[in-house]
Amino acid sequence: MTRVANEAIACPQCTAPMEALALEGHYGQPVQTDLCGHCNLIWLDAFESINLSGLGWVQLLRRMQLATATPTAPMRDTLDCPRCRSRLSLVHNQSRAGHFGELECPRCRGNLASFALLLARCGFVRPFSRRDLDTLAKEGREASCLNCGAGIAREHAARPDAREAHCTYCRSPLLAIDMPRFLDVLLRRHAENLPREGQRLAWACRGCGAPLEPTHGAACEHCGHWVVVPSLVDLRPLLDAVEPALRAMRPRGGRPHMRSRAGDASETALARYVLRLRAWITGR
């Protein structure tokens, strides 16, 4: 269904108007989505994807952080499509974090997902583990729900079937941010990686205080301390550090034929091949 400019849709859960967001996709193309900050829900119309640039993710995550500051209710068992009022059906998908479900309209093919399940759909999260709980306890922090921000009792999250554990408040699966996978997407704009000098991250190890390079792995390279990000709010220093570099990044212009980035045509593999072929033909 074609989106109408400035058209507000009602949240299927609370019926309040959803906030229409135009987020940056790759090559500056807008990605349209609708967000309910009361219910922590995201609506995507048919054929819309959440293929955002790094700056687009910064924009969306900042809005999601504001939403998790206020309580949210569990998603109801039956909800209707905000476009055509058809009953939404539960569909199951597979990601790196395991199985996850989202609601789909059988008529409009739009999708409704919670914040946590949207991140699971994009492969940015992993199931909460007992090691995560032990690390948070050592740091003096409490586990929290990635979707709504509510605290999680240790005895609930540490059950043997932790992979299937859910938040007792909003019923969202218990998940943590997978930092290497998340940063692989965050540090990109215009389909290019952020320049190395712009990748200085404001992220210090909670074990030894050394600067972390979370793109390399899930543990500190100096002391081996495990990196746990159970809350969207924990990402705020990281977003503050990365956003200026992303905004300063401009799309790279096209290069003349057989011209390298350094400006010397002889540096390109194609140019060297053409020169050798020409020498072989002419005997020079």
Image (tube, rainbow, N blue to C red):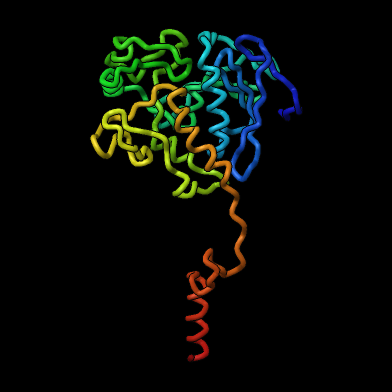
**In this picture, is 189 found above or below 59?**
below
**Which picture quadrant has residue 89?**
top right
At x 30% / y 12%, what residue is drawn? Answer: 154
Q: In the figure, is residue 70 to the left or right of 123? A: right
Which residue occupies the extreme left position in the image?
Answer: 223
Left/right of residue 93 with respect to residue 89 in the rendered view: left
- Residue occupying the point 75% across, 25% down: 6
Question: Which image quarter is the N terminus in?
Answer: top right
Q: In the picture provided, is 79 more to the left or to the right than 168? A: right
Q: Please tell me in which quadrant of the rendered image residue 142 appears.
A: top left
Q: Could you say where residue 54 lies in the image, as x and y percent from the top left?
A: 53, 38
Q: Which of 239 and 149 is in front in this view?
A: 239
Q: Which residue lies furthest to the front in this view?
A: 209
| Whole-percent x, y for residue 216 in the image | 34, 41
| Nearer the observer, 257 or 135 | 135
Q: Give the total number of marks visible in the rendering.
A: 0
Vertical placement of 244 versus 267: above or below? above
Please provide percent x and percent y for residue 85: 68, 14
- Front-most of 271 and 262? 262
For the point 45% across and 8% down, the residue is 169
